[in-house]
């Protein structure tokens, strides 16, 4: 867990008691004043849409997955069946934006957007996702953040602050959330909204273990950015 | 490993399970998310989205050891994405007006003071690193024990305690005398 021994030694019941004391009155006031008013039928209606959309996506992408698995096996004989990392794809398969791998999938929509779903994503999937995004018209940099690395660290490095114009462009390119289905993280990208020369940045932040189920992906969150021009060095070439 | 008995039963076949879960847990989950984001509207939107995802994944989630914690975690992770997307648009200015809190609009002096203290606490919580904030929210607003918090976050109990220790130090620094006064007054 990469924790120092003195961290553990510093933990005492006193800390918990102090926190409970400091936060307790606020927690009590929340209990008295805050209640969830959203009707159940609204929740379940949204949940059904998420589930149905996800089923459609899985059904459509399954055909592409079968094709790319076969091509990957030809291109890289050493690839283990059933694990199929993104880097195992044959170059010609990448021209089709529709792809369904273990780590991620891309699906083109009739309106021209590309739905990217982050699934059991691993560091080895980074170059493949970056390449597929590039070929789908999204000039992209994909990065990962390891557990305990601090989720916001890459976003606060020197020069990483986006301008308000870049922020507005990001909002045009990116739609969140999409049909995550409760497990995976999905986003819709509009290649036509990408300004010439701009770079879309995607961070996958890992969690040490799978949270939801053995089928769930190991990532904890996915963060996004867009730079119109030079990408800050700390993002383009992060320190090892 | 899939359990075929679980896979055959989805939310459509057992709607009462999810309805019961929602009824029993929704207020607690909303309060925990509220504590982390400090905004009532955003907290309700995030919590509702997390419950919708829970419904979509209910046939697996219903066997989760702590589904309430799952909902809060998904809501906060969704919040990270939204915050990232809107980080220039949503900001807290020290000394500015406190976030909204139902009941805080009262002209009663004590309630106004409470609302100001709450606002400072919410702001201090938002200043914590994400994992520390998750630990604090799960432990002290959702009332999970250390072991359940650890399982939910996929970390060890020792790491949870370490985050509690660090969060206590950080909040003590951020809140100053308010931290000590609130601690003593309990």
Image (cartoon, coloured by chain):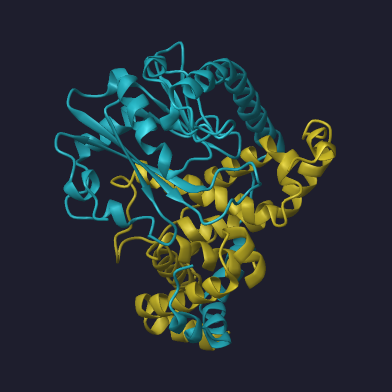
How many marks the image carries: the answer is: 0
Q: Give A128 or B51, whichever is nearer the viewer.
A: A128
Q: Which residue does the image show at 72% across and 42% down from the upper left?
A: B60
Q: Position of residue B91 (x, y in %)?
A: 32, 53
Q: Give B117 or A101, whichever is nearer the viewer.
A: A101
Chain A: drawing colour = cyan
Quadrant of the rendered structure where residue A176 is? Answer: top left
Q: Position of residue A66 (x, y in %)?
A: 57, 18
Q: Which residue does the image show at 31% across and 62% down from the upper left?
A: B96
Q: Is residue B137 visible?
A: yes
Residue B105 against residue A203 in the figure, above or below: below
Q: Which residue does the image show at 60% across and 23% down from the upper left?
A: A58
Residue A22 against residue A170 in the figure, above or below: below
Chain B: drawing colour = yellow
Q: Position of residue A143 (x, y in %)?
A: 34, 43
Q: Is residue B105 visible?
A: no
Q: Give A118 or A31, whichever is nearer the viewer.
A: A118
């Amino acid at each position: 867990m990469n924790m120092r021994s003195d961290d553990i030694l510093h933990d005492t019941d006193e800390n918990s008691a102090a926190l409970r004391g400091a936060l307790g009155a606020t927690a009590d006031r929340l209990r008295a004043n805050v209640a969830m008013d959203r009707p159940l039928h609204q929740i379940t209606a949204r949940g059904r849409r998420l589930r149905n959309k996800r089923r459609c996506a899985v059904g459509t992408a399954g055909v592409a997955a079968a094709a790319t698995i076969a091509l990957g096996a030809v291109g890289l004989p050493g690839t283990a069946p059933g694990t199929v990392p993104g880097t195992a794809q044959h170059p010609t398969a990448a021209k089709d934006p529709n792809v369904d791998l273990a780590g991620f999938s891309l699906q083109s929509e009739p309106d021209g957007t590309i739905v990217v779903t982050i699934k059991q994503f691993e560091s080895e999937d980074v170059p493949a996702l970056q390449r597929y995004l590039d070929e789908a018209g999204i000039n992209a940099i994909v990065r990962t953040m390891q557990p305990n690395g601090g989720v916001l660290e890459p976003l606060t490095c020197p020069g990483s602050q986006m301008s308000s114009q870049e922020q507005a462009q990001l909002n045009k390119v990116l739609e969140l959330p999409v049909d995550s289905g409760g497990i995976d993280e999905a986003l819709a990208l509009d290649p036509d909204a990408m300004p010439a020369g701009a770079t879309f940045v995607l961070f996958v932040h890992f969690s040490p273990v799978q949270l939801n189920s053995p089928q769930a992906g190991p990532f904890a969150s996915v963060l996004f950015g867009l730079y119109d021009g030079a990408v800050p060095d700390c993002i383009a070439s992060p320190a090892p | 490993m899939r359990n075929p008995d679980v896979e055959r039963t989805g939310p459509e076949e057992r709607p009462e399970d999810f309805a019961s879960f929602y009824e029993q847990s929704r207020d607690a989950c909303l309060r925990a998310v509220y504590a982390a984001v400090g905004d009532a509207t955003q907290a309700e939107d995030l919590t509702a989205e997390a419950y919708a995802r829970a419904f979509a994944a209910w046939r697996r989630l219903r066997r989760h050891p702590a589904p309430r914690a799952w909902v809060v975690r998904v809501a906060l992770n969704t919040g990270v994405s939204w915050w990232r997307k809107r980080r220039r648009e949503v900001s807290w200015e020290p000394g500015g007006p406190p976030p909204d809190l139902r009941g805080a609009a009262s002209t009663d002096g004590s309630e106004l003071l409470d609302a100001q203290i709450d606002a400072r606490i919410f702001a201090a919580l938002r200043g914590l690193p994400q994992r520390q904030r998750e630990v604090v929210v799960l432990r002290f607003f959702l009332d999970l024990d250390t072991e359940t918090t650890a399982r939910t976050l996929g970390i060890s109990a020792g790491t949870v305690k370490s985050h509690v220790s660090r969060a206590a130090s950080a909040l003590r620094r951020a809140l100053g005398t308010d931290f000590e006064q609130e601690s003593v007054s309990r």
